[in-house]
């Protein structure tokens, strides 16, 4: 017998070789270029995460494609140790329906569902539904699945190439007496893996050996070339039943296999399945019996109509025969009169056929396990295979033979088979429950992020309100009440190229304190040489007394002059003092209030030029002949105007944010004179202090403001600038974590630490070339070690939303400014340049682009060029000082 059926007996060498061959087929299926011609399609399932214990609710599940059509109601109780209760009902799918029109099948399913809901008394409920549809489907998302081809006993018209979810929805709609929310379509292999994964988290493979056969497993996203994204995992439905459909098994298929295929509903298709699964195993044995009977090797050469009838030797016979029961009865039922030898031979044939089936399965499984082991780069793979199907459950020897051969083919894997007790329906419900949880979580995340997303109308409203506040700032009557102070800077003219000499410059108020020497030479063309040194100012000095702060400034100037070999020099100084100052002339600046991280006492309301000079006096290390105090926006504008005369605005988006621009004197009611223009320091950071932005502020903005140095102050700045964006992100991340939407709800102490999420992380996280892995390393730095890839994706999205809003708000503010200048000059079209500086603007990968897009959209009649300041505002301050000194010497000042 064994000699007669030697083709059915596969050596370990053959099986190992076959396993390698199947692995190659898997690679072909995973690879974008070869997938279209691959026989083993490796279909993405969009099942990426497993239950996390928080799922709960009632879920419907349909289980179609196996030997029984089942409808289930699955109740999942959350609260951590999940409990699952199930009620199910099997419904018949008449043969006619399995071979009729698609709409008939889905109408039938809808009828069964209605009947089930009726019985359960839940027809009025719209429950989420998971649909186990055990046929090869191309999925584009969890709830959209296009049938590639029918297999097994199904062969209906009008379904292949169609989305089975829409077909089912249509049939349910047609009935109109109940509704469900179809959230997921899965293969029975996936349902089985999820069902078993519920009890064993090592379960990463789902196996079906039933009417049909197939397997799925958790694959690395980076290997799924048909999918975007390379982080994390996704379950892949191998559809290994089709292995060999491209001829890859011709050397192993026997004539009996070819006969089976020829007589099947789908010749040339599912060739691997036809050598293994329950729908064909009985037929394999029958054809062998017929062949051997005809060759006088069995039943004295006698055949009977029953024996010659396809499907008459059911696979269940094999289960019975191999468990030593009924072989005689089975052959009698085929009208045969078998001898004891015939019975023993038949039993041997059954064994050989089922053993081949088990070994073929083992060979393919071994390939899947090696793939997973290599993905994990694991020495020893510990894995559980969730399995279901009438052959695996019904055949007395199949599980043992399968398990044994798998261990022989992959001895370095610690594999366990876990038989699914509840069918794939439970798994489908779990996938639906996870999808439901993810959808609810996604909805909540998007709801929260939605509060941080501004519409065009809202941005236009910000522009309109800022325009109104600017007008109130320029107007004498309303200047004191407005939040946007529109401070005159007494900078009215730009360098004419004749300025020359050495000028000291200080740059205080940004992220670093600089002392500069700016040398203007008047050769052919005016040349500017600059020397500078950066000094740090520690927290204590920033928040100590004004005297200590200015003493420190003077100490740095003295150190710089020593460094420059100019000890005891007496030079004019341009003082970039990046805080709101009331000025009545260039060399006086009354500090209105500190902003950003500064809080030195006894300075607000004082003239900072005076405070500086007093400190110089105290130290007697050098002298300052003249001091011009300018805002960093003005210094930046002047630095850039030196390069591009069309530069009439200055913008800072750094630790703080602010802007200045050249305003018509006749519009500046707070300053005498109507001729020409003067630069106005807008101090737009304070916009919103009178509630102008309250309806755009989120709970996160309020949280950042309340925990800031100056609650209620600088509201616009706190939605835009570098000192605050990281904090806004941190508060959103804390909110998401508290709601279990992030980091599995595990809050880390570090995440609760103010300032821990620096704004530079926003820029890093958003740089396109930064892979998620690096996002995760930032999270690790924040003590968020257990973060997942989804967490990283979400952190990146939060950073993106917060950064985008800041850039848009900045764009809306600029639109208000340039449109004001255009209207000032009664121009239909304005072309102008903005000098810009600040760490956030310079380092954030998308800020400038988004800001410019918003500006273009909200001020379409202005063509705005942005000129990044390379030399900082110190140069501008020195140039302003030089102009002032020139004007002074020409008695024009
Ligand atoms: C039971 C599962 C079902 C799957 C079936 C396969 O719940 O999803 O299709 O096993 O085994 P069969 O019924 O085809 O033998
Ligand atoms: C560089 C300028 C300085 C300004 C700073 C703002 O020279 O005057 O204050 O940019 O950017 P930040 O350093 O706050 O990012
Ligand atoms: C189908 C698979 C299914 C398997 C087991 C095969 O015929 O193509 O989708 O998983 O049967 O039911
Ligand atoms: C200050 C402005 C400064 C801006 C940028 C704000 O906090 O009020 O004066 O221009 O920061 O540094």
Image (cartoon, grey):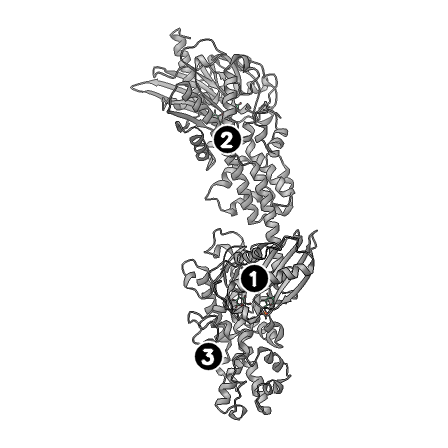
* Image quadrant where residue 726 sits: top right
User: Where does the C terminus fall, quadrant-wise?
Assistant: top left
Q: Residues within 10 Å of mark 2 (few under 14, many from 20)?
A: many
In the picture of the structure, the residue carrying the numbered disc 2 is 459
| Label 3 SS | helix
Q: How crowded is mark 1: few (under 14 residues within 10 Å), some or many (20 or more)?
A: many
Mark nearer the N terminus (2 vs 3): 3
Mark pair 1, 2: CA separation: 50 Å
Q: Nearer the viewer, residue 455 or 835?
A: 455
Under 8 Å from ligand 4: the CB of mark 2?
no
**Of the numbered discs in the image, which one, if any, rests on residue 259?**
3
Q: Nearer the viewer, residue 547 or 416?
A: 416
| Label 1 SS | helix
State the image coordinates of residue 140 (x, y, percent, origin top left). 49, 55
In the picture of the structure, the residue carrying the numbered disc 1 is 107
Q: Which of 536 and 697 is in front in this view?
A: 697
State the image coordinates of residue 735 (x, y, percent, origin top left). 63, 40
Query: Is residue 852 shown left or right of residue 688?
Result: left
Q: How crowded is mark 3: few (under 14 residues within 10 Å), some or many (20 or more)?
A: some
Under 8 Å from ligand 3: the CB of mark 3?
no
Q: Determine whether 549 is above or below 317 in the image.
A: above
Instruction: Specify whether residue 84 is in view.
Output: no
Mark nearer the N terminus (3 vs 1): 1
């Amino acid at each position: 017998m064994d000699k007669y059926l030697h083709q059915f007996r596969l050596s370990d060498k053959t099986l190992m070789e076959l396993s390698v061959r199947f692995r190659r087929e898997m690679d072909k299926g995973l690879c974008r270029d070869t997938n279209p011609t691959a026989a083993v399609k490796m279909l993405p399932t969009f099942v990426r995460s497993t239950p996390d214990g928080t799922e709960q609710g009632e879920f419907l599940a349909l289980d179609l494609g196996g030997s029984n059509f089942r409808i289930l109601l699955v109740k999942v109780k959350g609260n951590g140790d999940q409990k699952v209760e199930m009620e199910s009902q099997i419904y018949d799918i008449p043969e006619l329906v399995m071979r009729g029109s698609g709409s008939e099948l889905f109408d039938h399913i809808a009828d069964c569902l209605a009947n089930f809901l009726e019985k359960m008394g839940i027809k009025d409920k719209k429950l989420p539904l998971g649909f186990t549809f055990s046929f090869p489907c191309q999925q584009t998302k969890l709830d959209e699945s296009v049938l590639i081809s029918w297999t097994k006993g199904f062969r209906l018209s009008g379904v292949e190439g169609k989305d089975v979810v829409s077909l089912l929805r249509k049939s349910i709609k047609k009935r109109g007496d109940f509704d469900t929310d179809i959230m997921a379509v899965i293969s029975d292999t996936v349902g089985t893996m999820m069902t078993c994964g519920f009890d064993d988290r090592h379960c990463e493979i789902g196996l079906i050996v039933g009417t049909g056969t197939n397997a799925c497993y958790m694959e690395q996203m980076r290997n799924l070339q048909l999918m975007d994204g390379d982080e994390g995992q996704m379950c892949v439905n191998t559809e290994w039943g089709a292995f060999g459909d491209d001829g890859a098994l011709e050397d192993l298929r026997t004539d009996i296999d070819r006969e089976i295929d020829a007589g099947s509903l789908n010749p040339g298709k599912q060739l691997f399945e036809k050598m293994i699964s329950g729908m064909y195993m009985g037929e394999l044995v029958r054809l062998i019996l017929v062949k051997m009977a005809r060759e006088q090797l069995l039943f004295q050469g006698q055949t009977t109509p029953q024996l010659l009838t396809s499907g008459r030797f059911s696979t269940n016979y094999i289960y019975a025969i191999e468990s030593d029961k009924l072989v005689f009865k089975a052959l009698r039922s085929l009208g045969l009169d078998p001898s004891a030898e015939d019975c023993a031979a038949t039993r041997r044939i059954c064994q050989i056929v089922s053993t081949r089936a088990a070994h073929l399965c083992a060979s393919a499984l071994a390939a899947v396990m090696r793939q997973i082991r290599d993905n994990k780069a694991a020495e020893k793979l510990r894995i559980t295979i969730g399995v279901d199907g009438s052959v695996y459950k019904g055949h007395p020897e199949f599980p043992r033979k399968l398990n044994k051969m798998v261990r022989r083919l992959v001895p370095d894997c610690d594999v366990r088979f876990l038989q699914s007790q509840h069918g794939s329906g439970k798994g489908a419900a779990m996938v639906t429950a996870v999808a439901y949880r993810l959808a609810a979580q996604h909805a909540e995340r998007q709801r929260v992020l939605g509060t941080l997303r501004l519409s065009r109308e809202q941005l236009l409203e910000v522009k309109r309100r800022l325009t109104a506040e600017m007008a109130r700032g320029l107007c004498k009557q309303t200047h004191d009440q407005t939040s946007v102070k529109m401070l005159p800077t007494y900078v009215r003219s730009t360098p004419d190229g004749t300025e020359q000499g050495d000028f000291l410059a200080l740059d205080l108020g940004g992220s670093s304190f600089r002392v500069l020497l700016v040398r203007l030479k008047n050769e052919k063309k005016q040349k500017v040489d600059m020397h500078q040194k950066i000094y740090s100012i520690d927290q204590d000095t920033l928040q100590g007394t004004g005297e200590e702060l200015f003493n420190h400034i003077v100490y740095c100037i003295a150190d710089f002059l020593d460094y420059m070999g100019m000890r005891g020099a007496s030079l004019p100084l341009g003082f970039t003092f990046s805080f709101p100052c009331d000025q009545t002339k260039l060399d006086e600046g009354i500090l209105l209030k500190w902003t950003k991280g500064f809080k030195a006492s006894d300075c607000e309301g004082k003239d900072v030029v005076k405070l500086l000079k007093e400190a110089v006096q105290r130290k007697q290390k050098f002298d300052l002949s003249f001091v011009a105090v300018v805002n960093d926006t003005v210094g930046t504008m002047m630095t850039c105007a030196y390069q591009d005369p069309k530069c009439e605005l200055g913008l800072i988006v750094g630790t703080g944010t602010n802007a200045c621009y050249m305003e018509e004197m006749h519009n500046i009611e707070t300053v005498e004179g109507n001729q020409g223009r003067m630069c106005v320091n807008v101090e737009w950071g304070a916009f919103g202090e009178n509630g102008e932005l309250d309806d755009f502020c989120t709970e996160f903005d309020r949280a950042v403001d309340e925990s800031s140095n100056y609650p209620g102050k600088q509201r616009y700045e706190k939605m835009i600038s570098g000192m605050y964006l990281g904090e806004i992100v941190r508060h959103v991340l804390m909110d998401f974590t508290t709601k279990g939407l992030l980091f599995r709800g595990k809050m880390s102490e570090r995440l609760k630490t103010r300032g821990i999420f620096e704004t530079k992380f926003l820029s890093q996280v958003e740089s396109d070339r930064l892979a998620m892995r690096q996002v995760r390393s930032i999270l690790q730095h924040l003590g968020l070690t257990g973060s997942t890839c989804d967490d990283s994706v979400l952190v990146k999205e939060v950073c993106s939303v917060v950064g985008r809003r800041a850039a848009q708000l900045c764009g809306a503010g600029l639109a208000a400014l340039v449109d004001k200048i255009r209207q000032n000059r009664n121009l239909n079209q304005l072309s102008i340049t903005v000098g810009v500086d600040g760490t956030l603007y310079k380092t954030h990968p998308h800020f400038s682009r988004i800001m410019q897009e918003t500006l273009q959209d909200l001020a379409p009649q202005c063509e705005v060029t942005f000129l990044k300041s390379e030399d900082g505002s110190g140069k501008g301050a020195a140039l302003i000082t030089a102009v002032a000194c020139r004007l002074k010497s020409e008695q024009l000042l």
